[in-house]
Amino acid sequence: DATYKSKYLWWNTLAQVERFQDCSGKSTYYRYDERQHLVAVTDALNQTTTLERKPDGEVQRISHPDGTTETFTYNVYGQVLSHTDGKGQTTRLMRTARGLPSSRQDAKGQRVRYEYDKAIRLTALVNENNATYSFAYDVSDRLSEEVRVDNLTRRFSYNVGGHLTRLDEIGYGENAERPERHTLFERDAIGRLVAKLNSDAQQRFTYDDSDRLLSIERQPTGIGKQLGVTEEKLEYTYDLLGRLTKEITPAGTLGYEYDPLSNLTTLTLPDGRKVNHLYYGSGHLHQLNLDGLVISDMERDDLHREVYRTQGKLTSCFGYDAMGRKAWQFASTLSADKLSQVHNTGVNTSLLVEHAYNPIHR
């Protein structure tokens, strides 16, 4: 790449990647069956995920490195009907004769229903609490009205080019009052937003010949001034690669510098101080410093996940399960080299936070 770091790929005779090695020397391996379907992935920690497939390629089972499995069932059209996770919890999809989802029952037994019109457009979504979102469309199949579960109604108007030109919002108060808010959108000949107007303020937008945003200017209305809305102008400049290099605000100017891989390397604050970003490999952040004074150091594992972070005298540690989910995190004033064990006699274990997940991975 532009920093003279190399990534390598090994291919089989059918032009499928069998091995990928990143610029840090970490490899991921891929294995395929006789039908050229992917059936196994082994990561840089030597953890393997395997996939069992039907003859036509549909995934029937995924076996994860932690020993758990996911299974799937399908209808005759190859559409998913059910998914069972590693804890045996099943999510089911019921479908219409056209194959559209008509309802979904999650692992907790909660059901979401979907309704459609004759043009196969979604007209209603009924959530687990039996509350309904409803939708209406114009003759060009564009969303024209949305009514939310809290009775907020939103209506949309478009120009002949299909761009949004007006948004009407009608609320619903505790005493059945219906406050309204209207927003107008003005656009140029190629559809770019050039103005946004409502009762509080009007905002104007300008662009360069490459369609990059150059400025946003806000002018409050009389009502807006009473609400505390003020005048404001933001300006932006870019380099030849289209990267933001300067942001001018009423509070001062922010400057941005990048490395050859377009990773942000320096953020210059309005007072002239610089927040420097240091990376390894293709762009994995490992240090933040302010004019050379370290704010935070990070260490990562072979999958480039953050495992240590220093912030002043505080060191945070992070651990992950075989599924890649954060399993625990810990904070201590001990230095990183002394945190070889979480339950060290000098460690306050009240700072240990463990993470558990429900059947739907939340």
Image (cartoon, grey):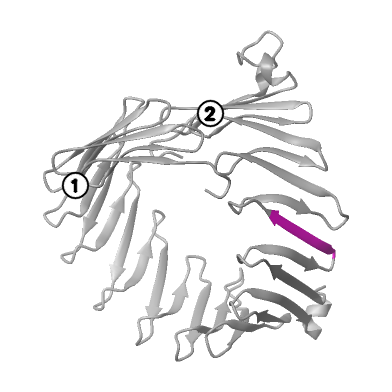
Residue at point 67%, 81% (across, down):
206
Q: Which one is earlier in the sequence, the residue at label 2 or at label 1? A: 1
Find out whether residue 34 is within the magenta segment: no
Q: Which mark is residue 15?
A: none
Residue 21 left/right relative to 241 = left
Residue 261 left/right relative to 350 = left
Q: Amino acid at mark 1?
A: Glu
Helix, strand or loop for the magenta stretch, by majority: strand
- Start and end of the magenta stretch? 251-257
Q: Label 1 near label 2: C-beta < 8 Å?
A: no
Quarter-of-image position of residue 300? top right
Crowdedness of circle 2 by 10 Å Cα count: few (<14), some, many (20+)?
A: few
Residue 82 left/right relative to 298 = left
Residue at point 53%, 72% (across, down):
152
The residue at the far front in this view is 4
Q: Residue 44 or 180: which is nearer the viewer? A: 44
The residue at the far right in this view is 271
Instruction: Let me know if residue 190 appears in the view.
Output: yes
Q: Amino acid at mark 2?
A: Asp
Quarter-of-image position of residue 85? top left
Residue topped by disc 1: 58
Residue 344: percent from the left, percent from the top?
Answer: 65, 10
Q: Is residue 144 above or below residue 309?
A: below
Residue topped by disc 2: 301
SS class, disc 1: loop
Foreground mark, 2 or 1, reads 2
Residue 36 left/right relative to 329 = left
C-alpha separation, residue under disc 2 versus residue under disc 1: 33 Å
SS class, disc 2: loop
Residue at point 66%, 51% (across, down):
264
